[in-house]
Structures are given as structure tokens and as C-alpha cells.
Image: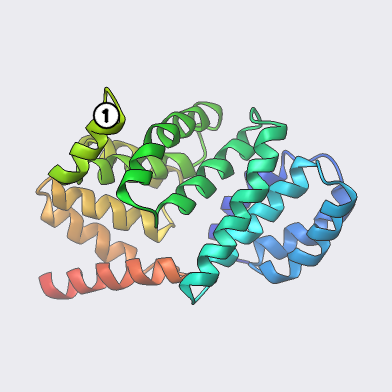
């Protein structure tokens, strides 16, 4: 069993009280990363119960990770859009459910990451507000600490042209901070020390702060971790290249 993804899914499953018998096989396939096996039973449940947030939530999670596994960029985008469609429906049904809110933030962030800088900036405050709410509701869940760390890193890294766009959109543009990025990423790492992405973003943050030795140590640890999806493979290559150049 993949311990990293068992950790990711466990907080979701302990909240599920309906359709327990139907979900048991689906949940096992999710934990075992057998995402294609979950689609047909989930879609059948969705036909019978089109407004059940637990079904919609699992459909969104399934499509999210199918997107992460996709080789072709077009397929990646299509799966991400499906993930957002289902979680948006669940969010409209119950936006106070902490797991619905968490996966809504994840799906929203993924759908805008390939959009224009303007569109990313337009969504930035929304992502910040929702992420901080999830942190308040699920303080022991790593996801939105990680999202907030990346949020601060990316905003702090914006160039002059992008900052000008932000000033056009907002009277008070969102402000990123590498120090805040470090804080949130360290919180995420404290909760789950086994995710390669946290080492990558925290290492990049330390490079921005001038802490090259700290970045090297983080990358050196990160390259030893699992990288089950395309995204993680790219992070591994970037970290591995840095370690080789500075070894």
C-alpha cells in the first residue's frame, strides 16, 4: 500500500457515513492508486445519487489524480476540468464541509495554473481565503499549508509586469512573501515528511532567501522520496540536477 496516499485519503474516509458498503471497494482502489477502476462504480452511483457530496468528492479526487498521471497535456487538462466540475457541484451543495472545501481549492488551483498570469492573479485572493479557511478547519492536514506556501512563493516571485497587472485588478494587490512561504511549507513538512513536492518548494524558497546549503539538504532528501506521478518526476529532475551541480 502506498503510505503517502493512504495519508492523503484517510481524513476523507473517516468522515464518510453513507454508502459505506459501496465505498469500501472504491476507497481501497483509491488508496492503491487504481483510479481507473473507481470511475465506473462512482459514475453509476452519481447517476443514482446525483446530489451526494461523498460521491462527487470521490469523483473529483479520481479525476484529479488521473490528471496527475496523464502523459499528454490535453488529457491532463481534460481530467482537471472534470475534477473541478464534480467538486464545484459538491461545493455548491455543502461548502462548509472541510474536505469538500479542501478539494475545491486543490481543483481550482490546478485549473488555473496553466492559465494566463492575469487569470491566476484574479483567482489568487480567492485561493488564499479558501486555503486559510481549510487550515482553520483541518489544522492537521498538510494540503493547504502546502498550497499557501506555493501561493506566497509564486506571488513573491512575480516580475514587474505581473505586479502591474495585479495593481490593475485589485485596489490592494495580493502580496507574497518568501518568509511566509517558508512558514507554511515547514508546517506542511512537519505534518507529512514524505511528500517530494514539499521538499522541492521549500528548497526553492530557501534559494530565494539565500540559504543555498539548506536548499541543497532539502533537495538531497527530496530525491529519495516516491514520485508516482508526472508532476513529481519533473520536481525530482530539477532537484537532482541541482544536487549534481552542487555536490
In the picture, measured across the screen, residue 47 lies left or right of residue 208, that is: right
* Dot 1: element: loop
Q: Compared with residue 131, is residue 8 higher up or lower down, i.e. above or below?
A: below
Residue topped by disc 1: 173
Residue 175 visible within the image: no
Please provide percent x and percent y for residue 106. 51, 47
Which of the pair 182/128 is nearer the observer? 128
Please provide percent x and percent y for residue 190. 39, 43
Q: Quadrant of residue 94?
A: top right
Position of the C terminus, as image quadrant, is bottom left
Please provide percent x and percent y for residue 77. 51, 63
Which of the pair 73/207 is nearer the observer? 73
Binning the other alpha carbons within 10 Å of mark 1 as few (below 14), some (14 to 19) or many (20 upward) gives: some
Q: Residue at x 19, y 70 (%)?
A: 243
Position of the N terminus, as image quadrant, is bottom right
> In this figure, what is the number of numbered marks?
1
Which of the pair 164/84 is nearer the observer? 164
Q: Residue at x 53, y 49 (%)?
A: 107
Q: Residue at x 44, y 33 (%)?
A: 126
* Residue situated furthest top in the rendering: 171
Q: Quadrant of residue 197?
A: bottom left
Q: Compared with residue 149, is residue 59 higher up or lower down, i.e. above or below?
A: below
Amino acid at each position: 500500500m502506498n503510505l503517502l496516499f493512504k495519508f492523503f485519503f484517510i481524513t476523507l474516509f473517516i468522515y464518510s457515513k453513507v454508502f459505506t458498503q459501496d465505498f469500501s471497494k472504491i476507497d481501497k482502489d483509491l488508496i492503491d492508486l487504481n483510479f481507473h477502476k473507481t470511475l465506473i462504480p462512482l459514475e453509476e452511483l452519481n447517476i443514482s445519487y446525483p446530489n451526494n457530496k461523498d460521491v462527487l468528492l470521490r469523483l473529483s479526487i479520481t479525476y484529479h489524480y488521473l490528471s496527475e498521471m496523464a502523459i499528454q497535456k490535453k488529457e491532463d487538462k481534460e481530467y482537471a476540468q472534470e475534477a473541478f466540475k464534480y467538486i464545484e457541484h459538491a461545493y455548491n451543495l455543502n461548502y462548509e464541509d472541510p474536505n469538500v472545501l479542501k478539494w475545491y481549492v486543490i481543483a481550482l488551483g490546478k485549473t488555473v495554473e496553466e492559465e494566463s498570469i492575469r487569470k491566476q492573479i484574479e483567482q489568487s485572493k480567492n485561493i488564499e481565503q479558501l486555503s486559510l479557511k481549510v487550515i482553520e478547519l483541518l489544522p492537521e492536514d498538510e494540503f493547504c499549508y502546502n498550497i499557501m506556501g506555493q501561493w506566497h512563493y509564486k506571488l513573491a516571485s512575480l516580475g514587474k509586469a505581473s505586479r502591474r497587472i495585479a495593481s490593475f485588478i485589485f485596489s490592494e494587490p495580493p502580496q507574497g512573501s518568501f518568509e511566509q512561504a517558508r512558514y507554511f511549507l515547514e508546517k506542511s513538512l512537519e505534518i507529512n515528511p514524505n511528500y517530494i513536492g514539499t521538499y522541492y518548494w521549500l528548497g526553492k524558497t530557501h534559494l530565494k532567501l539565500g540559504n543555498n546549503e539548506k536548499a541543497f539538504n532539502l533537495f538531497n532528501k527530496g530525491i529519495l522520496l516516491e514520485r508516482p506521478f508526472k508532476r513529481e518526476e519533473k520536481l525530482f529532475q530539477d532537484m537532482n540536477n541541482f544536487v549534481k551541480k552542487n555536490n
